[in-house]
Amino acid sequence: MSRKEKIFLILAVLYFIGCLTGASLVTDAIRVYIGKHGWSTFNSLFFPFLYLVLIIVLALVVSRLWIRYPTWGEIVTVGMGIAVSTWIVSNTMLLTTELVHIPQFLFSTLLFMAAFPRNLPLALTFGGVVCIADEWAQTFMPGRVLDLNDIALNFIGWFLALVAWQSWHGKPTEEETVTGH
């Protein structure tokens, strides 16, 4: 493991610990903020951030399409991910504050991918374990519960990390680079 990969692994672990230990503090702070300023003010701050994250992922995907056409495996993966994500979001009772799981686990999984760039299955496994462990650990915190909806949102972030990573790091063949397809 290179020095750079070790740094990303340390960042991934620290990010997870920070998210885990800060969950109650952040949740309480958000509740106080919403109570004081209202949902509309919170939404006016949060939604631009969420849209920025989604636009960055979309930009990565579009830039990849300029380099080469996607493979059938990539098309199927994205199609299934969109279908499952849409089903999860449409069949879940969501508060805006719960949507923070998506960028949170997108960044967490990207850190694991940067820590293990030559072993993507291991990185994705760590990212998936963290998606579940985050919610499981909340069962030990006062006033917190394991929520399957949150685990599903965590995995939407995990999936977006996979799409972003593949879009950024997918290497075109020499022929694709020359022809543009």
Image: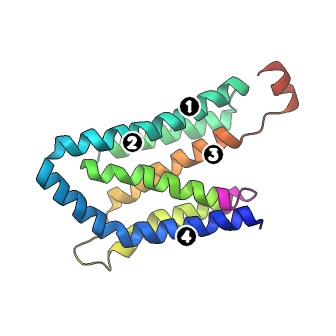
Earlier residue among tags 4 and 1: 4
Residue at image location 34% in from the left, 61% down from the top? 148
Residue at image location 60% in from the left, 27% down from the top? 62
Instruction: Look at the image and tell me whether residue 11 can be seen.
Output: yes
Which of the two discs, 3 and 4, sits closer to the camera?
4
| Segment tinted magenta in the rendering | 114-122
Earlier residue among tags 1 and 2: 2
Callouts 1 and 2 close, C-beta under 8 Å: no
Crowdedness of circle 2 by 10 Å Cα count: few (<14), some, many (20+)? some
Determine which quarter of the picture holds residue 27: bottom left
Mark 4 and mark 1: span between their CA atoms?
Answer: 27 Å
Crowdedness of circle 4 by 10 Å Cα count: few (<14), some, many (20+)? some
- 113 left or right, relative to 136: right
- On residue 13, the disc is 4
Amino acid identity at mark 2: Leu
**How did the renderer colour the structure?**
rainbow
Residue corresponding to mark 1: 59
Callout 4: SS: helix
Mark 1 and mark 2: span between their CA atoms?
Answer: 14 Å
Crowdedness of circle 3 by 10 Å Cα count: few (<14), some, many (20+)? many
Amino acid identity at mark 3: Trp
